[in-house]
Amino acid sequence: MFLAHRTGQPARAVETETDATGAVWLDLVDPTDNERALAARICGESIPQRNDLEEIESSSRLHTEENAVYVSTPLVRRTDTELDSTPIGFVLTRNHLVTVRFSDYTSFNTAARQVSDTPHAISSDEALVVILECIVDRLADVLEQVGLSLNQLSRDVFSGYNPKRDQRVASWQRTIMRRVGHAEDFASLVRDSLLGLDRIAIYISENRKRELAKGLEARLATVNRDVSSLTDFVSQLSGKVEFLLDAALGFISIEQNDSMKVLTVVSFIGVAPTLIAGIYGMNFKNIPELNWAWGYWYSLVLMALSVILPLIWFWKRGWLKWGE
């Protein structure tokens, strides 16, 4: 999809060069080769492909070629069911801003509304700043939701396994570990996105310092400060995730120890009755209780005591808790 954004007008699909007349922002969403070629003719610069945007070295993500600035960064995207990160690229020229992306982002939709609602004409630099501001605002909102989710996860971890609420302890443990792992994955992806945005803002400020208006310099500085504060928040979330992981593993270890205690008790109380039954089941004529009228009942009582007394002993040591 190829969209052209103009100030004071809604976005328009671009099929020919005429459709992009007067547009300051050209937005390519999962573009085809024909759409990339059309955008290159309109702005006069080459348009990077996806494998170019996925390069990890700084020289590939941030560089200048003649009259155009090329910057890119991975950007995290979260939906109700999935979490992923795809690269986004910016080609900044004197008259146009070209964005190349491969997913639908709420922040880009917000930026498009702001550009179309602006009554005065904006430059390509200002369009880039608007997009960066919307991305940072969106990441801040998402991080707030992640913080609330981690608070709920912390309560679930420290409330422990509840037989009335959870089906099985193993299922509860798996759910907790999956939630912790999902939180760590998301924090890592957000950290990469924030690092890329910070580098872009610094690079634009340094390489287009003469072209930027004073107002844009201040807005880019604000973006840098917001990114720094969000990075600190992500670091705090990562520390909390590590703490919750350690706590979850500790509780799982405790649950396993309790299970082993139960198995030990069951094994132990089965040994003594078996021993007694084995003694009185031996084929010897000179067993004292063999001809005793109460010998059978005596052996049963002895077996029962060999079960009850160890249970009482384990209970006093805290290995068994009745009613749990």
Image (cartoon, rainbow, N blue to C red):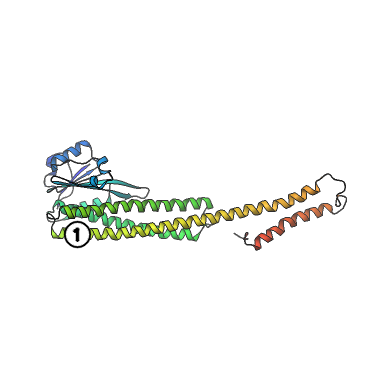
Give the position of the C terminus as an image quadrant.
Answer: bottom right
The 10 Å Cα crowd at callout 1, few under 14, some 14 to 19, many 20 or more, is some
| Depth order, front residue of 145/263 | 263
Give the position of the N terminus as an image quadrant.
Answer: top left
Q: Image quadrant of residue 114?
A: bottom left
Q: Image quadrant of residue 147?
A: bottom left
| Residue 272 visible in the shown view | yes
Q: Image quadrant of residue 33?
A: top left
| Residue 165 visible in the shown view | no
Residue 169 pos. (x, y %): 53, 53
Judged left or right of residue 237, residue 75 is left
Residue 99 pos. (x, y %): 21, 46
Residue shown at 41%/60% (left/top)? Answer: 151
The local secondary structure at tag 1 comes to helix
Q: Which residue is mark 1?
A: 219
What residue type is disc 1 on? Arg
Residue farthest top in this picture: 34
Residue shown at 66%/52% (left/top)? Answer: 266
Judged left or right of residue 130, residue 182 is right
Residue 119 pos. (x, y %): 13, 56
Label tally: 1
Judged left or right of residue 48, residue 287 is right
Residue farthest bottom in this picture: 316
Residue 311 pos. (x, y %): 68, 58
Residue shown at 84%/53% (left/top)? Answer: 295
